Image (cartoon, rainbow, N blue to C red):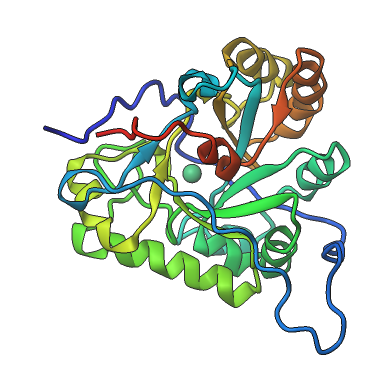
């Protein structure tokens, strides 16, 4: 029995970067009296059990909006933002190209939209202050998008390919970059660059102990310039329990902030509540893990 899952439509998932932050991190609520031990540790994020032979499990959306567990279908949706930066884009960043998007992150804060940022290790190294600000703000959680943003299966939008032996290390190296930047709200979730994976990759990543996270709604924001088209694609696609993939880099996804500005109030108007991936997965009915 195979663990392979259908990839679905991946249009525009390959490149683009995300990130950003502007204000300094807000103090942690109820935080630190001098001499207090460690800051309140975040609750342990839910994960999925490994598949056969230890294969990395894959999560795509909350099935049926949660109704299968006997609770009513809940109108929740997770917006996720990929902070892409490939290992070889340093010179472009040095010459002024922005792979971050502080305005987008500020907007998410202003609108109070809990979000999950899938960050590459390379991005955290380029923008350590922003990685720390995102990773210490309870509004956000940082998940892993590999260190280099190279492909874990081929072909994948022309991305260079990671060898099987280096796959788990790619994930560990990104976690290490987040720690080094000072991020704390880090969850053990991994998004394959470009969403590209196969059975070999799921096996090779077993030692990394992550849950892979795909999506069911493609925003189409990569390289898009028409914010309304992006917003409409998302608004058309969202159902209860949906997981939306977007990006936050000004250079490769310039319309995202404007699209989010439209998406958030419209979905709230329809009765949706925004959650992080960890909350979407938390309410996942037991016993229906993907096999
Ligand atoms: Zn990506």
Q: Quadrant of residue 212?
A: top left
Q: Nearer the viewer, residue 96 or 192?
A: 192
Which residue is at 72% across, 64% downward? 136
Q: Quadrant of residue 229?
A: top right
Which residue is at 72% across, 42% downward? 114
Q: Is residue 57 left or right of residue 177?
A: left
Q: Nearer the viewer, residue 203 or 30?
A: 30
Which residue is at 76% across, 58% downward? 137
The image shows residue 60 at horizontal and vertical percentages of 43, 31
Q: Nearer the viewer, residue 134 or 38?
A: 38
The image shows residue 253 at horizontal and vertical percentages of 64, 36
Residue 227, above or below 155: above
The image shows residue 64 at horizontal and vertical percentages of 48, 18
Which residue is at 28% across, 56% downward? 205
Farthest residue toward the left?
1
Q: Nearer the viewer, residue 223 or 276?
A: 276
Q: Quadrant of residue 265?
A: top right
């Amino acid at each position: 029995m195979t663990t392979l899952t259908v990839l679905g439509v991946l249009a525009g998932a390959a490149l683009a970067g995300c990130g950003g932050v502007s204000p300094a991190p807000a103090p942690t609520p109820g935080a630190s009296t001098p001499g207090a031990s460690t800051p309140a540790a975040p609750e342990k994020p839910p994960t999925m059990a490994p598949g056969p032979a230890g294969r990395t499990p894959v999560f795509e959306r909350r099935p049926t909006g949660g109704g299968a567990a006997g609770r009513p279908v809940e109108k929740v949706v997770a917006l996720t933002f990929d902070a892409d930066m490939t290992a070889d884009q340093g010179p472009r960043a040095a010459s002024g190209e922005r792979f971050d998007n502080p305005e987008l992150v500020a907007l998410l804060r202003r609108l109070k939209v809990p979000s999950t940022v899938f960050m590459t290790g390379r991005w955290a190294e380029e923008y350590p202050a922003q990685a720390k600000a995102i990773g210490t703000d309870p509004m956000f959680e940082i998940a892993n998008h590999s260190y280099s943003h190279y492909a874990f299966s081929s072909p994948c939008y022309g991305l260079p390919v990671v060898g099987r032996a280096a796959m788990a290390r790619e994930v560990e190296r990104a976690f290490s970059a987040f720690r080094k930047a000072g991020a704390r709200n880090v969850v053990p979730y991994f998004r394959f660059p470009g969403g590209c994976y196969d059975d070999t990759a799921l096996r090779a990543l077993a030692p990394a102990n992550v849950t892979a996270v795909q999506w069911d709604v493609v925003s189409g924001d990569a390289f898009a310039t028409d914010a309304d088209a992006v917003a409409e694609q998302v608004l058309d696609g969202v159902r209860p329990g949906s997981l939306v993939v977007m990006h936050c880099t000004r250079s490769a996804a310039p319309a995202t902030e404007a699209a989010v500005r439209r998406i958030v109030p419209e979905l709230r108007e329809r009765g949706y509540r925004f959650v992080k991936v960890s909350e979407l997965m938390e309410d996942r009915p037991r016993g229906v893990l993907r096999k």
